[in-house]
Image (spheres, rainbow, N blue to C red):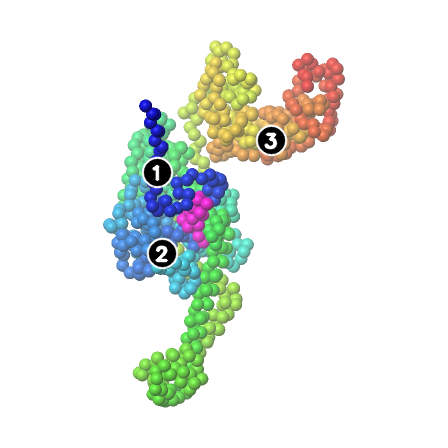
Amino acid sequence: MAPKKKKEPKAAKLPASAAEIENAGVVMEQKITDTLETNYMPYAMSVIVSRAIPEIDGFKPAHRKLLYTMYKMGLLSGAKTKSANIVGQTMRLNPHGDAAIYETMVRLSRGNQALLHPYVDSKGNFGKAYSRDMAYAASRYTEAKLDAIAAELFGDIDRDTVDFVDNYDGTMKEPTLFPVSFPSVLVNSNIGIAVGMASSICPFNLRELCEATIGLLRRKDFDVSSVMSGPDFPGGGMILYQPEEMERIYRTGRGSVRVRSRWKYDRENNCIDVTEIPPSTTVEAIIDKIVELVKGGKIREIADIRDETDLSGLKITLDLKRGTDPDKLMGKLFRMTPLEDAFSCNFNVLIQGTPRVMGVYELIQEWSAFRTECVRRRVYFDLTKRREKLHLLQGLERILLDIDKAVRIVRETEEEAEVVPNLMIGFGIDEIQAEYVAEIKLRHLNREYILKRTDETSRLKDEIREMEEILKDTGKVREIIISELREVMKKYGQPRRCIVLYEVEDGPAPEEEDRPDYPVNYFFTKEGYFKKITPQSLRMSGEQKLKEGDEVQLALEGVNSAHLLFFTDRCQVYKARGWDFDDTKASVLGEYVPAKLGMGPDEKAVFMAVTQDYSGFMLFFFENGKAAKVELSSYATKTNRKKLVGAYSDKSPVAAMFQAGEDGEYLMESSGGRMLIAHTGAVAVKATKNTQGVAVMTLKKNAIVARVRPFEEQLIGNPHRFRTKTLPAMGAFPREGDLGEQLTL
């Protein structure tokens, strides 16, 4: 019996459309770089340029499309209309879904309270920016129109001040920017996350910002901080003013602003009422964090917490236990909850299609240049219109000389098409003037009407002359901008909502009596492991358990409240307290410091200093032969900072570091075999942490400082050979008998 033939798999049938495509269904190799460039880069650029980053007028495309639609609907002065109607009309410019458009409108509304100066006057439930759970109503239930300040966005838009482009299907025109008459980019907060970059702009008080803009328009060296007190958030709160950080924001556009909640103590009911919170948090997040701390036993003074927010505004009430000090409690809550939080600034703005991070100074200058161009284009537009009108009136002036002749020319012309040419010939006027004269109504063929029209010529000539001078003189354009800014200040200026605390009190220190203080022994190993062992446990333990190849680098006696400074190989120091670590035994490895303190990838802890009052100093010996002596108090901070950068100089690798309470002698050994005994009294103490120090050991070419130890008499048999009166010094080679058995190179 013949074996059956194996059936060959049938080729999959492709649809007719796919079959016609060349290489359809074929897997082709392609470089990942080509794929990213072809497929991902257009998307990334679209998100950056057309979605997430605001432009110099302060708006993203979604904002601009919505507000321009409302303007064209006549909602600047008319009555409110249903939000669903606005959303539907906006879809002619914005191809996204109605939900995204309505969400944009909610944030721009007065009811949501997300903006310092809302652009949408709302009616109905638009939710609240300070609440995570208070959702806004559907668009069919709410109503809206443009707020009064929106007039400053559209005042000149119909006078050729900005460019217009086609919408997505080419059926409408939309503006590329709004000709805003004030620096709106800095008035309302704007946050966006693009691809590979983000933007986070905090709001400033309108009155203060206009004053700063006027000052910079008049003088380039104007000090913005003299009129601007810092950001002004719509939810209020208290700004903890830090001059250096604020100046950094003004100059570079990067930095952070710490905002603290406002509260008051109700003595009658023994409760605290929080009425204003930072912009970066919500009521629910604050309550959740406080409840977590109470359940964990870290906060014991609170009996109850509830959200009493109503139509009158935000309110979180904390009922206190009897005998609680409200100031101490709030100091603890500011440190441990979002009741005090930071707003990170990143002033990333699109300038002519290019994202740029700029400070307040540069942003005001860019806006001034943009507004100057808008004013010049507006003046040129008005100048053109007046020139055209003057041209027509000059033709009408010719008719004044002989009205009967004009009537006779019209009557005697047999064909209508010849009326304009005959008027041109009869009075020596051009076609545009002749067309204007030919269209005059019969009732206007009287001397009074014509005289009134011709009287306008002198006024028009004066206006044209004035406009021409404005276009030639940038100073006059600048004065126009300044007068408009003063008008905006007068109409829409508001008092600050945020209180500025210039002298910031860190609040009461954490109640250390809550943490037991007792004697302990600290151990730190070369591999970065840490142990805290009580004396009783240490007496009962055997030898220390260590990782293979590891050894104890430091063993110190101290107390549980001691400050621990862990220096890393990245020139940073991480700070902790003894009580941050659990008591342990000698029979365990201990805690790995980089993991415990959240150090960076591949960052290692190389030294530990223990102090109670930050007295004494740190000694750093570098491989290039230099040594630095830094006061330990340089690492003390008023705020509870956990990490300090620039802990020591990175100009040369560190050969050794020591914590010392007083000066002494140290034995330095070079890779070339020389030895030097140096006294640290010859090294001046510095308050600057990353000082390069002074030269101590002079080295031959390619030699480095290989080892440094505190000097003890038994280390060397003839120590006077290695001492010197002046530094730097090369040291000396050890002779036979100079070294003990334990000291070899």
Name the residue tied to disc 1.
12
* Label 1–label 2 contact, CB within 8 A: no
Q: Would you call the spot at circle 2 few (<14 residues within 10 Å), some (14-19), or many (20 or more)?
A: few
The x, y position of residue 42, in whole percent, is 44, 47
Q: Would you call the spot at circle 1 few (<14 residues within 10 Å), some (14-19), or many (20 or more)?
A: few
The first of marks 1 and 2 along the sequence is: 1
**Distance of mark 3 from mark 1, alpha carbons?**
77 Å
The x, y position of residue 652, in whole percent, is 63, 32
* 458 over 552 or under it: above or below: below
* 187 over 728 or under it: above or below: below
Please state which amino acid type lies under the numbered disc 3: Val
In the image, the segment drawn in magenta is 38-56
Viewed as shown, does residue 642 lie left or right of 415?
right
Name the residue tied to disc 2.
169
Please state which amino acid type lies under the numbered disc 2: Asp
In what element is the residue under mark 1? Answer: loop
**Which disc number belongs to residue 106?**
none
Viewed as shown, does residue 134 lie left or right of 692?
left
Judging depth in this view, the residue of 263 and 76 nearest the camera is: 76
